[in-house]
Structure formats: structure tokens, C-alpha cells
Image (cartoon, helix red, strand yellow):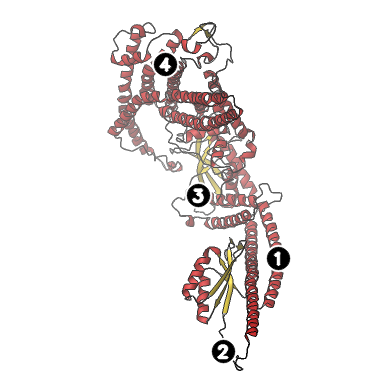
């Protein structure tokens, strides 16, 4: 089954190439009202029609099916509520249900309402029970802690009274008066309050109490060892048990207000020890009963949520489908007879038969007496762009679409990106050791593809998984270019035979400084391993990679210009062929195509000519003799001809095209004015036939000429800057090679030279982390971004307009994983 780019449903048809988008057609479907729901549902399953909104002037509340959408939105709210409750309970909705879900949306609405009411009631009862349980736990703590304070205080008072009695007995004498004076002052009765206060507020609580009562209270606090669940918030909070002694009702009222302000929970408390013991026993019994009740409620609630979770995904999908169906129905035009709906939309030409079959099936299943009418409309409106892609090509197409969606049936760079993008990446990343590491990491995603495709991954992991086949191609090409460069973590190998060079003397002591001599045929594939580590390594690789970058850049830019020819030919635009494609091809190849030819000739002949000198003096002194810089006979004449062609191609691009466009506009305007005399009433069947946005606009010659001037200057300057931009292939390839060499020599080999196991292990660990972090992550990202830039700017600007819009069909497959 192929994956559709910009829509689903393309997998049942024979695949077409990606070079041009699928031919599209504007269709009109007249649907009887009694079969409208079923018809739109079948079209959603097919996923090959992009409906147009024929009621754009109406607000959502003025549309026909606003009430049904509101009902679906309410059902979606209930499902979100169920999902939140399941997540809080640690449950996940089952993807595959063993029970059959309700397919009737009305029955489902009733069922969801009953389940929501039951769950809300259970939550409310559970909340009341948990609050009562938390209050009883706090009450028990108050009874324990405050009881300990009262019992200790009573013990100390009793001991003090006994001591006083003993002292009074010992001090009795003859001088003691027979009649003692009685204390006539009235005894003051102190009141007290007990409760719990959050520990973080305890100091402020004590300070405010002291200030509000002017110190006429006595406060005793005892810390609770473990956090307790606060009845109000339901969260665990560290608290202190307090007892406040006061005198007077006014002071009591102040204390009550302060307790309320600080969230201090107060509980009734008796100073009688027997009543305290009875209270503890009673509270413990009530806690045990509440615990049993709460556990039973949680079990019942868990069973209910599990039942909901078994069918949640099916319910959710059904509600989403219903809501999308009514959204689509609201886009259709209601006929004045109130008996049919009129739909307009885009569909691929190949899907005509499938759409008609779906319409017939919908009419039969809905027992409609009249079937839907399907017809193709003629229009000048630009159709959407639709490429049928699979899991391999979709990621490459996304790379192109990130720059801009192709215009309808414009040549698609995605075809060539499949090869050129990973190859240009590999030119900068060339090391077959690093390529193997990248390949192994990618194979993990590809092997576990089925398992990971249905899971929610992190942003970076999901992005990497989506581009797994792009990375696979990047890794394979990196292995290839690494074999060409003969680098395995910067170490060369004689994989394809012995080196073509040998040492000057038998001892080979000075081979890396004094040079080498050639003793056999050239190394059969890639760079000779003897170049690595020699004195000539850097100049040799510099020259090789720089010239190779120019060759690759000119080849890709030529490909872009050639593709502009195919675009012009397809759209029957002869002006662009003669006055854009041909002069651009001549200009680019007269300069940089010629430079590429000189590079190849120099490689084949082994000439010592200075190509910089040749190219510079080709412009400054074209008639001077070349001398030792001559690479082939007739080079001077060839350069004069190419220079002349390059100069001629600039006005060729600039001047004729604006005048020809003006002439075409005048001819088209004249022919259209004659055609208007022959219009009939039948033209009403062809909407937008006479509404070409460019048909009757004034032709501003100055604007067209300035635009062409800018385009010409941009191409001429871009030919130089774009060619220079491809030198990033050389720069990044050299940087990657040198970094790899530094890590190998200055970390791994340096640690090896100490002959110490611990240092060697540390060196290996540092080498691995440096290789992975810098070369396999940062360098991969850098090379990827530079390859992306070369495609977007240097390649695609030669032929790709990218001003189209995607084909987004109405498809149930597109919102299967989306959240409402």
C-alpha cells in the first residue's frame, strides 16, 4: 500500500512516476439528502476527493449541520474527560478492542452521557470520602499529639502539687495561725483550641497570634513526623499540631479568624483523658470503615474506566469520523428544492471509477431511490498538486516540499533528490567507517519499523524515524565515498590491491618526507592509501576534492537548466525555451562548463597548466598566447568563441522575452474579445471559464522588463556564486577528514603510546564520545543542512517555481492519530 503525499487512498492504484504530479480534475457531485451522510462517509474512506467550501460566506452557526457538529463536539468533550480520568488512574486506552463498539452515533451519545454521569457521581462520592478520611486522620493526630501534651502537663502539675504539700507539712509550727486567709480572687477559666497548621506557615501563624492578642495566648506546637493529606487540596503537606490557650470570647474570635486565614484545620478536643481515649478508639474504627469503603469505590471506578478504555479508541474514531462528515456536509451547497446537496472538489483523474463505485454503493446501502450524479467541470483554476509516494519516497518529497510545493504538473525535483541529496551529503561526510555506524543506527529504526510506527516518540526521535530511508541512503553513499577517499576513521586500507608507489630506498625511513616512486599500475579504485600521511596528502586531496566539487556542481546546475526545458515544453511555452533555456545553458557552460572540461583534460593528460590563470586571463586578455597553460590545440580560438557566446547570451536572455510576452498578451486579448460575442447560456455550466485572473489585466511592459532584468542579473551573478557555493563540498569533506584524523592520532594513538591500560581505556572512551558527538552527530547535521541548501538554492532555482498547494483530500486516514 503506497503512502500518499498530501492525502490518502493512493495505494490501491498502480504507482506513477514522481516526475509530474497526478492529473487532477474538478468534479461536481449532486447527492440526495437521504444518502448524503453515507455518501460522504464512503468518500472519506476512499480519501481521493478534496471538497471545496461552497458556503464560505456563512458562519459556522448558519450552516445546515451546525447542531450535529455541536453534538459531536459534546461527545468529544466527554471522551476527553474519560481519557483524562484514565490517565490519572494510570490506565491507557486499548488500541485493539476485543468487544464490539456501538456503530450508531445516537446510541453512543446516550451511552457516553450515562457513563459520564456515573463517573462524575463516583468522583464526587470518592472525593467526599477521601476528604472525610483525611479529616479523620488529622483528627487522630490531634488527639494523639495534643493528648500527649495534656497528659505530660497533668503529670507535671500533680508532681508539683505533691511537692508543695510535703513542704507545707514540714513548715507547720506553733506560729501558724489557726485561721488562714482565703484567696478571694476569682479563678480564671482558660479555653483552648487544637488543630493542624502547615509547617511552612507555622512561624508566621505564631507571630500573628502573638501580635493580634498582645501576647495573651499560650501556643504549643508539635511537628508531625510524616506529611499528611490536606482535606481541602488533597495534596500531601507537612503540618504541625497546635494547642492554643486563651482567655475571653473576643480573643477566641480573633484566633478563629487567624486559623481560617492560615488554612489551619481545627478539631474538637477534650481535656479529659478518658474522653480522649474514647475519641481515639472511635476515630480508628471510623477510619477502618472509610478505608474499606474507599477501596471498594476505587475498585468499582477502575473497572468502569477499564470498560471505557477497551472501547475508547473505537468511540473516539467514530466521533471524529462523524464530526468530519458533518463538517464536510456543511461545505456542500443545499439546493433550493431542499432535496439534494451539491458538492464540488478536486480528485485525481485515475480515481474517477473508484469514486463512481463509492457513489453507487452509498446509494444502494442508504436505500436511496435516486443515485448521486457525478460530472467533471471545466475550469481555469489551478488544481492542487498530488504525488503518490510510498514510505521510501515520502521523506525525499518532504525535503522538496519544505522549500515549496510544486506547481501543478511542474517537474518535480523529488525524483532526483532521492539520489543527489544523499550523494552530496556523502561527498562531505565520506568515511566508510562513519558510514557503517550511520547505517547500523538506521537499520535499528527500519527493523523495528512496525513496532515504532504506532507509538508516540519524542520530537527528535520521530523526525529521525520519519527520515530513516533518507539516512539509509546517506549511509550507503557515505560508505561508497569513504571507499573512494580510502578513509576508515581516517585510516587508509589497501582493500583493492597494493599501492602503486614504493619507497625511494629499501629502509623506507624517509618515505613520508622525501617522496615516493611509482612502481606499478595506478591503484584500481579510489585514493591510493600511500597518499595518507605523506607530505603531499593535503595539497593532493585539496586539489582533488575542490575540482570534484566544481564538476558535481556544474553537472547538477546543468540538470536544473535541462529540467527547465522539460517544464517549458510541457506547458508549451516556446518563449522560455528559446529565450531562457538556451541562453542560460550557453552562458553556464561557456564559462564553468568549459572549466569542467579543462579539469577533465588536465586529469587525463597530466598537464601542469594553471587553470586559475587560464580562466582569469580568458576575460582579461583573451587574445594573449597561452604558453605553458595550453591544454589542447585550438584552445585560444575556443576560448574566444565561448567568451563571445557568454556575452551574447546575456542580452539574449534580457531583451526579446518582454517584447514577445507583450505581443502574446495583445493577441490573446484580441481573440478573447471576439470570443465574447459568441457566448451562450451554456457557459453557465462551466464555472470560472471566463474568470481567468490574467486574461484582462493590463500588461505593464515596464514591470515585465524590470522583472526580466532582475532575473537575468540574478542568473548571471548566480552562475558564479552558485558554482562557488559548491566548494562547500570540498571544505566540509576536508574538515571531516581532518577532524577524524585529529581524533585518531591525538586521542587514540596518543593513549596507545603510553603503554598503560587505564590511559588506553580512557583514550578509547574519549575517542568514542568524540567520534559519536562530533563526527556522527554534529558533522551529520552540518552536512545534511549544506546538502539541503545546495538543493534548495543552487539546484531548484534553475527550474522550480514551487508556488503550488498540496492536495488534501477528505480522508479518515489523515486524522486517525490526531486529537480533536
Q: Which residue was labeled with disc 1?
A: 293
Is residue 771 in sight in this rendering?
yes
Q: Which residue was labeled with disc 2?
A: 183
Q: Secondary structure at mark 4?
A: helix
Foreground disc of the pair 3, 2: 2
Residue 488 to residue 802: above or below: above
Foreground disc of the pair 3, 4: 4
Left or right side of 21 for 161: right
Q: Which mark is residue 328?
A: none
**Earlier-in-chain disc, 4 versus 1:** 1
Alpha carbon distance from label 2 to label 1 = 57 Å
Q: Which mark is residue 331?
A: 3
Q: Which mark is residue 596?
A: 4
Is residue 470 in sight in this rendering?
no
Q: Are marks 4 and 1 in contact (CB under 8 Å)?
A: no
Q: Nearer the viewer, residue 205 or 342?
A: 205
Alpha carbon distance from label 3 to label 4 = 57 Å
Specify the quadrant of the image occupied by residue 586: top left
Which percent across, then down, holds residue 649?
Answer: 33, 20
As drawn, the residue found furthest toward the front would be: 174
Q: Are marks 3 and 4 in contact (CB under 8 Å)?
A: no
Left or right side of 561 for 238: right
**Earlier-in-chain disc, 3 versus 4:** 3
Foreground disc of the pair 2, 4: 2
Q: Are marks 2 and 4 in contact (CB under 8 Å)?
A: no
Foreground disc of the pair 4, 1: 1
Alpha carbon distance from label 1 to label 3 = 53 Å
Amino acid at each position: 500500500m503506497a503512502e500518499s503525499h498530501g492525502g490518502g487512498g493512493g495505494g490501491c492504484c498502480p504507482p506513477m512516476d514522481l516526475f509530474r504530479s497526478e492529473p487532477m480534475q474538478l468534479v461536481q457531485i449532486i447527492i440526495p439528502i437521504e444518502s448524503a451522510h453515507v455518501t460522504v462517509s464512503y468518500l472519506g474512506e476512499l480519501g481521493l476527493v478534496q471538497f471545496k467550501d461552497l458556503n464560505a460566506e456563512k458562519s459556522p452557526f448558519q450552516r445546515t449541520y451546525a447542531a450535529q457538529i455541536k453534538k459531536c463536539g459534546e461527545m468529544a468533550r466527554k471522551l476527553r474527560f474519560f481519557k483524562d480520568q484514565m490517565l490519572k488512574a494510570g490506565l491507557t486506552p486499548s488500541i485493539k478492542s476485543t468487544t464490539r463498539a456501538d456503530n450508531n452515533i445516537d446510541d453512543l451519545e446516550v451511552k457516553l452521557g450515562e457513563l459520564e454521569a456515573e463517573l462524575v457521581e463516583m468522583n464526587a462520592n470518592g472525593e467526599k470520602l477521601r476528604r472525610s478520611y483525611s479529616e479523620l486522620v488529622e483528627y487522630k493526630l490531634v488527639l494523639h499529639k495534643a493528648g500527649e501534651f495534656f497528659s505530660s502537663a497533668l503529670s507535671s502539675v500533680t508532681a508539683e502539687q505533691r511537692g508543695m504539700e510535703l513542704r507545707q507539712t514540714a513548715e507547720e509550727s506553733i506560729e501558724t495561725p489557726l485561721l488562714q486567709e482565703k484567696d478571694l480572687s476569682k479563678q480564671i477559666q482558660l479555653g483552648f483550641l487544637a488543630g493542624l497548621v502547615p509547617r511552612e506557615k507555622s512561624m508566621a501563624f505564631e507571630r500573628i497570634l502573638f501580635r493580634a492578642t498582645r501576647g495573651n495566648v499560650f501556643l504549643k506546637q508539635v511537628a508531625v513526623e510524616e506529611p499528611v493529606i490536606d482535606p481541602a487540596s488533597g495534596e500531601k503537606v507537612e503540618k504541625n499540631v497546635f494547642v492554643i490557650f486563651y482567655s475571653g470570647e473576643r480573643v477566641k474570635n480573633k484566633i478563629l479568624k487567624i486559623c481560617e486565614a492560615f488554612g489551619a484545620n481545627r478539631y474538637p478536643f477534650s481535656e479529659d483523658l478518658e474522653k480522649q481515649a474514647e475519641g481515639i478508639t472511635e476515630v480508628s474504627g471510623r477510619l477502618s470503615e472509610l478505608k474499606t469503603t474507599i477501596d471498594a469505590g476505587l475498585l468499582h471506578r477502575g473497572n468502569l474506566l477499564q470498560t471505557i478504555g477497551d472501547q475508547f479508541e473505537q468511540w473516539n474514531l467514530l466521533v471524529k469520523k462523524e464530526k468530519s462528515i458533518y463538517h464536510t456536509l456543511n461545505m456542500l451547497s443545499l439546493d433550493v428544492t431542499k432535496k439534494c446537496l451539491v458538492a464540488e472538489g478536486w480528485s485525481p483523474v485515475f480515481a474517477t471509477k473508484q469514486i463512481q463505485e463509492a457513489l453507487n454503493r452509498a446509494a444502494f446501502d442508504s436505500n436511496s431511490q435516486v443515485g448521486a450524479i457525478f460530472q467533471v467541470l471545466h475550469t481555469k483554476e489551478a488544481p492542487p498538486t498530488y504525488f503518490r509516494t510510498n514510505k521510501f519516497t515520502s521523506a525525499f518529497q518532504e525535503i522538496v516540499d519544505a522549500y515549496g510545493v510544486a506547481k501543478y504538473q511542474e517537474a518535480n525535483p523529488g525524483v532526483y533528490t532521492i539520489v543527489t541529496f544523499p550523494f552530496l551529503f556523502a561527498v562531505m561526510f565520506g568515511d566508510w567507517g562513519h558510514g557503517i555506524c550511520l547505517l547500523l543506527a538506521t537499520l535499528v529504526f527500519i527493523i523495528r519499523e512496525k513496532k515504532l510506527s504506532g507509538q508516540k516518540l519524542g520530537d527528535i526521535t520521530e523526525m529521525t524515524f520519519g527520515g530513516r530511508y533518507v539516512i539509509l541512503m546517506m549511509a550507503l553513499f557515505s560508505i561508497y565515498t569513504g571507499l573512494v577517499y580510502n578513509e576508515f576513521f581516517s585510516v587508509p586500507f589497501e582493500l583493492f590491491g597494493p599501492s602503486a608507489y614504493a619507497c625511494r630506498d629499501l629502509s623506507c625511513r624517509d618515505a613520508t618526507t622525501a617522496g615516493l616512486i611509482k612502481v606499478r599500475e595506478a591503484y584500481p579504485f579510489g585514493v591510493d592509501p600511500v597518499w595518507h600521511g605523506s607530505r603531499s596528502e593535503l595539497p593532493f586531496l585539496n586539489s582533488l576534492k575542490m575540482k570534484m566539487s566544481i564538476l558535481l556542481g556544474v553537472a547538477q546546475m546543468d540538470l536544473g537548466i535541462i529540467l527547465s526545458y522539460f517544464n517549458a515544453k510541457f506547458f508549451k511555452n516556446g518563449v522560455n525555451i528559446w529565450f531562457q533555456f538556451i541562453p542560460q545553458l550557453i552562458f553556464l557552460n561557456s564559462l564553468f562548463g568549459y572549466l569542467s572540461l579543462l579539469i577533465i583534460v588536465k586529469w587525463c593528460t597530466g598537464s601542469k597548466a594553471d587553470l586559475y590563470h587560464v580562466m582569469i586571463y580568458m576575460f582579461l586578455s583573451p587574445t594573449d598566447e597561452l604558453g605553458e597553460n595550453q591544454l589542447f590545440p585550438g584552445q585560444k580560438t575556443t576560448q574566444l568563441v565561448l567568451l563571445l557566446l557568454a556575452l551574447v547570451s546575456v542580452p539574449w536572455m534580457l531583451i526579446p522575452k518582454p517584447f514577445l510576452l507583450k505581443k502574446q498578451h495583445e493577441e490573446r486579448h484580441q481573440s478573447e474579445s471576439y470570443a465574447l460575442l459568441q457566448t451562450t447560456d451554456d457557459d453557465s455550466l462551466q464555472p470560472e471559464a471566463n474568470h481567468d485572473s490574467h486574461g484582462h489585466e493590463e500588461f505593464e511592459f515596464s514591470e515585465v522588463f524590470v522583472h526580466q532584468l532582475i532575473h537575468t542579473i540574478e542568473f548571471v551573478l548566480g552562475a558564479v556564486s552558485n558554482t562557488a557555493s559548491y566548494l562547500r563540498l570540498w571544505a566540509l569533506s576536508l574538515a571531516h577528514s581532518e577532524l577524524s584524523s585529529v581524533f585518531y592520532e591525538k586521542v587514540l594513538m596518543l593513549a596507545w603510546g603510553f603503554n598503560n591500560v587505564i590511559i588506553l581505556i580512557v583514550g578509547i572512551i574519549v575517542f568514542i564520545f568524540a567520534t559519536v558527538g562530533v563526527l556522527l552527530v554534529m558533522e551529520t547535521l552540518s552536512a545534511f543542512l549544506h546538502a539541503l541548501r545546495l538543493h534548495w538554492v543552487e539546484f531548484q532555482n534553475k527550474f522550480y517555481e514551487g508556488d503550488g498547494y498540496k492536495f488534501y483530500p477528505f480522508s479518515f486516514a489523515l486524522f486517525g492519530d490526531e486529537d480533536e
